[in-house]
Amino acid sequence: MPSLIDLTYLALMIKFQICQYILLCFIPFMSSCGLLNKKGNWGKNALYPVKAERIIWSLKKNLSSAHVWLPVAGAGVIVIGNYEDKISNWIAEEKHIFPDHKTADDWSDINNQILKYQTNASTLLTPSANEENSWGDYLQNKVRGAAVVVTSTSLPRYFHDRISETFPRQRPNKADMRSFPSSHATKASAYNMINIKNYEAINMDSNFRIGLITLNTGMAVITSWARVEGHRHNPTDVMIGYALGSFMSGFIYDSLMNHDPAHSLVILPMNDAWATQYIVQF
C-alpha cells in the first residue's frame, strides 16, 4: 500500500505541473488571439463525470495498442528463450549507436526532455474554444484538459517507482537494484502516447501528423535502446517500462478526457451490390 508520504509527494507533483500548464495557458494573452479562433472544445468534458463504460472501453483500447502488447510480447520471448544476457551484451558491446556509455545516457535524457516539452506544447496548442466561447471558457477547458495530461504522465512514474521497489533487480553495471522497469522508457513512452493523442486533436496536415508521431515514437524507442547500450538496463527492463508508460498514460487519458470517438457510416456502390462500412476513429 502506498504510504501517506508517497501520496503527498504525488499530489504535490501533479499540483506543480498543473500550475505550469496554467501559466502556459496565458501565453495567448501575451501574444495574439490566434488560439481562441481554433475551433474545438478539447478539455471541455474532461475529468468528470467518470463513467464505468468509458473506463472499460479505455482499458480494452489501450491493452490492444501495439505500444503495449508488442513490447510485452517481445519481453516474453526473451524470457522464455533465455536471451536476456545475449541481447544485452550484443547491444552494449557490439551493436553501438552511440560512441560510449555516457553519450548513450546523455541522449536518453535529451530525448526525454524533448518529448516532455512537446507534451507541454501540444497541450497548449490543442483547440479548446469555439468562436462563440469566451476566454473564460477557453481557460477552463484548457486547465481541465491539462489536468488530465499531467495525471496521465505522472501516474506512470508513480507506478514505476512502486514496481521498482517491489521487484528489485540489479542493473547490468551493478550500480543499484533499480533496473526493473526502466524509468526512462516509462517516461518516454508516456510522453509519446500523450503527444499522439494531442496531435490527433490538433487540426494539421495528416502527413505532417504522421511524421511527428513516427519521429516521436522513434525517439522513445531510441531512448529505450540507449538505456540498454549504456548498460543501465536489460532489454526486458526497457520493454516492460515502455509498455507500462504507454498503457498507463493512454488508459488514464482516454478514461478522463471523455472525448467521443468519431463515428461514420459509409455505404459504397459496388458492381452488383452495395458495401457498408462502419468506421470508428479513436
Image (cartoon, helix red, strand yellow):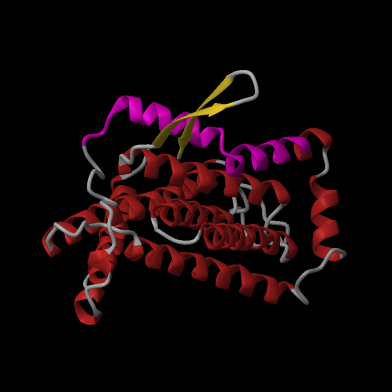
Q: Is residue 178 placed above or below 68 in the rendered structure?
A: below
Residue 115 lies within the magenta run: no
User: Looking at the figure, which quarter contains the C terminus?
Assistant: top left
Q: Is residue 143 placed above or below 278 in the rendered structure?
A: below
Magenta-colored span:
49-77
Point out residue 127 in the picture as x, y percentages from the top left corner.
Answer: 30, 59
- The residue shown at (63%, 72%) is 107
Point out residue 247 in the picture as x, y percentages from the top left corner.
Answer: 50, 41
Q: Main secondary structure of the magenta part?
A: helix
Point out residue 266 in the picture as x, y percentages from the top left corner.
Answer: 48, 30
Does residue 114 appear left or right of residue 135 in this picture?
A: right
Q: Is residue 10 placed above or below 45 in the rendered structure?
A: below
Which residue is at the far front? 272
Q: Quadrant of residue 159?
A: top left
Q: Nearer the viewer, residue 95 or 144?
A: 144
User: Looking at the figure, which quarter contains the N terminus?
Assistant: top left
Q: Nearer the viewer, residue 169 or 225?
A: 225
Give the number of callouts: 0
Q: Nearer the viewer, residue 277 or 125?
A: 277
Does residue 246 appear left or right of residue 142 in this picture?
A: right
Point out residue 28 in the picture as x, y percentages from the top left corner.
Answer: 24, 74
Which residue is at the far top? 273
Q: Quadrant of residue 117?
A: bottom left
- The residue shown at (42%, 62%) is 119
- The residue shown at (62%, 37%) is 69
